[in-house]
Image (tube, grey):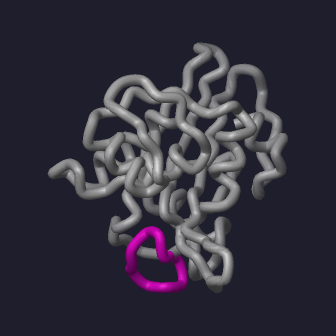
Amino acid sequence: LFLALALGLTGAVPAAAAEETVDILLIGLDRRPGLSGCRSDTMVLCSYHPGKGTLTMVSFLRDLYLPIPGHGSNRLNAAYSFGGRQLLRQTLEENFSLDIDGCIEADFSRFPQIIDTLGGVSIELRQDEAEAINAATDSTLTEGISLLTGDQALAYSRIRNLDSDGDLSRTARQRRLI
């Protein structure tokens, strides 16, 4: 999280007391060059517990249908398109009784840059996941542990339709990547 802040991602995170849990909402945007507007493709609440030195994560499914303040009920990912991270944050706080300390955003351009700055990320891949990444990035990955580049990590985090549970597996891959 601190590296993401150092890289200048959008969203300020206030300093917290040493024993207080810090809740940061990571927002992955489907923004692409040349297109106007975007939605939150991924929303992961990361809770750091300094006293324990642990991090817990929970994903919010983008197709979750709920009340969005001032906009009636809609899919959760529409909140960002209606009012940016402020409305998305308010929507989550009001619907789930949360107190989010800050937000960090990355889009399809920035996310690979972050991974590449870190030197890649090692992930254990199934054969079908490797094949999906290869198809999206013209790579030659195989089953087993692979060091993914930024573009490969983005493809991995976006894999859909390999598992019968759809978006649940996609969000599990995203948390594994984090």
Q: Is residue 39 above or below residue 24?
A: below
Q: Is residue 77 above or below residue 96?
A: below
Q: Quadrant of residue 141?
A: top left
| Residue reaching furthest to the left | 164
The quadrant the N terminus occupies is top right
Please give the name of the residue rendered at 34% of the width and 65% of the height, measured from the top-left corner. 64
Question: Residues in magenta?
Answer: 69-78
Please give the name of the residue rendered at 39% of the width and 79% of the height, measured from the top-left corner. 74
Would residue 73 be found to the left or right of residue 22 on screen? Answer: left
Q: Main secondary structure of the magenta part?
A: loop
The quadrant the C terminus occupies is top right
Residue 76 on the magenta span:
yes
Please give the name of the residue rendered at 52% of the width and 51% of the height, measured from the top-left corner. 154
Would residue 96 be found to the left or right of residue 150 on screen? Answer: left
Q: How far across and down, in percent of the image, does residue 32 sit?
A: 62, 73
Please give the name of the residue rendered at 23% of the width and 50% of the height, measured from the top-left corner. 162
Task: Give the total number of marks visible in the rendering.
Answer: 0
Would residue 116 be found to the left or right of residue 172 on screen? Answer: right
Q: Nearer the viewer, residue 35 or 146?
A: 146
Q: How far across and down, in percent of the image, does residue 61 sit?
A: 37, 58
Q: Nearer the viewer, residue 104 or 115?
A: 115
Q: How far across and down, in percent of the image, does residue 124 sit?
A: 39, 27
Q: Is residue 129 above or below residue 54?
A: below
Q: Quadrant of residue 17?
A: top right
Residue 49 on the magenta span:
no
Q: Nearer the viewer, residue 120 or 84?
A: 120
